[in-house]
Amino acid sequence: MEFPQLKPMAPRWRDTETRSVGVTMRDGATLAVDLSLPRGIPSGTRLPALVAATRYWRARELRWPFSLFLKEPDSARDFFVTRGWALLRVDMRGTGASSGMQPHPWPARDLDDLRDLADWVAAQDWSDGTLGAFGNSYQATTSALLCATGHPGVRSALVRFTEYDVYADIAFPGGVPNEFILRNWSAANEALDANRLPEGTPFLDRVLVKGVKPVAPEDLPAAVADHAANGRVGSLLGSVTFRDDVAPGLGVTLDEVSPMNRVAVRPIDAWGSWFDAATADAVIRRFVETDTPVRGVIGPWNHGGKQQVGAQKPAFALGAQMLEALAYLAEPGSEKVLHYWTVGEEAWKETRVWPPAGTSKRTLFPASNGVLSDAESTPATVEWRVDFDATTGTSNRWQTELDQRPVRYAPLDGRLSYTTAPFEAPTEITGYPRLSLLLSSTHDDGAVFAYLEEIAADGTVRYLTEGMLRLMHRKYVVANPGVPGDPSIAKVGPSSIHTYLKKDALQLVPGEPTQVIMVLQPVSVLVPAGSRLRLSIAGADRDTFARLPATGEPSMKIMFGGSASFLEIPIVERQ
């Protein structure tokens, strides 16, 4: 099937109209909803609905006198509604102008609320009885939850740039606490729940915006008071280490709120990026692990899809992305297919299996002289002291998740680095690289960060991917999905070989060598002839991840020789 199809879908109406309503749930709580319909639709017209349910305010109220003559833009509203869909922007329970409290992100009660909302939609005189959902990030997860409700009116959901496994995809990738996201996301939510703009909001917004848009102004103070009891995800720091830890401030494990454990029963249109946190891994896992029809789309974008990261030409403009997504919402697929962009080749590929057909492994061995080659290296040991000032900067793949900032990596100089000779022929790397290191440390815990880059013939460096692992989580698990109680979590990706469970924790014995295996985030790139690959290794990423161990100045040793340490890269045979 050609992708993208870019079917023309001209607007059917010229304008939209919006009204705020309160929708009552089965227990009496009220969800704040902005309902947008085409302006002037004939009586008796029936429309499908799209739900966009968030915890970041469905809409903002402007201060007087700006409210008299300004209207906040909403490109999604203008796009979908003029093309024949009703749009419901929703504040989830315990957020925005909705009543109640939110004990933690995506509580089980959200599914009940989404079912009640679907019932309400089906009963409206403008409704044809069907609905779907769309969104980026948090809103994408609520969209997937709508498809997990089993409501007969639900057709499909567009799920863009979000997690599938909350522990491993964003909060603790490789078991390493993502301190930047947990602290900043928690602080931003706390401000929003108190009806305040978060720190860092642009000055003009602070001048214009009064707060969340109320349904009835007299009801807003009580709703905001309800939100004071909301759980704070910042409580995960210092209280959660393992996948099965119950966060004291939230009362659940992260697995309990993960989409991987809320199975969608309606088709999902899942979009992610090779360069946006672990959203590509989330798309691939959803594609591999679920029986529900899935269309996966993985491109070279930042969070939200506005920036083309590393692409020589636009892979897919944002407006075109919406056209493609609308076509799937209108006619959801009945099978599974994955479309992915190969950076460097600047082309879309399609597969119905993972790994893609023709995939093999190439093994490269690092040596103490900084070479990375096909030949096993001679025995040697490299000792290095962890540099806790090492950083990938403040615009990396993890930080773009907070506010859709562009992905631009700081130079990775100063790390242990191993570089190949120039490639003799163009080589496509598509899949999950895997790194195995024989190492020891002076301390009983720590972390390893690994980065892959392409160095072009002219010396230009292009970031490709990375992985990390907290060393206490290093126990290697051989996946065996057919065995009851099998501890493996995933069928593919970084979580397929480590459980991150408390029972599998292994403290390092200082000075004792141990084998550490880690799977890096997936990527698809065509490395041209003349380019080289560089593997870099560090023990910290200061501006994003927590320091491990919290105190001390550890030194590590990496052992080379034979197959003691090696990198496997997934190679796709060229036609």
Image (cartoon, grey):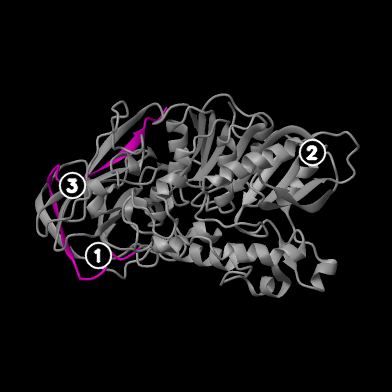
Q: Nearer the viewer, mark 2 or mark 1?
A: 2
Element assignment for label 2: loop
Q: Amino acid at mark 1?
A: Pro
523 drawn magenta = no
Give the image location of residue 87, x and y in percent. Answer: 73, 45
Q: Amino acid at mark 2?
A: Gln
Q: Which residue is mark 1?
A: 549
Give the quarter of the figure containing the N terminus: top right
Alpha carbons under labels 3 and 2: distance apart:
63 Å
Give the image location of residue 418, x and y in percent. Answer: 25, 53
Q: In the rendered image, which quarter is residue 191 located in?
A: bottom right
Query: Which residue, as the protein is rendered here, is positioned at the far front?
Result: 27
* Residue toward you, 62 or 275: 62
Q: Which residue is mark 2?
A: 124
Position above or below: 360 against 90: above
Q: Which residue is mark 3?
A: 565
Q: In the rendered image, which quarter is residue 67 located in?
A: bottom right
Give the image location of residue 35, x and y in percent. Answer: 76, 48
Q: Amino acid at mark 3?
A: Ser
Element assignment for label 3: loop
Question: Would you say 365 lies left or right of 166 here?
Answer: left
563 drawn magenta = yes
Question: Are there few (<14), some (14-19), or many (20+) residues within 10 Å of tag 2?
Answer: few
Q: Earlier in the sequence, mark 2 or mark 1?
A: 2
What's the magenta region? 546-575
Q: Residue at x 52, y 48 (%)?
A: 107
Is residue 260 visible to us here? yes
Give the quarter of the figure containing the C terminus: top left
Cβ–Cβ below 8 Å for labels 2 and 1? no
* Residue toward you, 306 or 248: 248
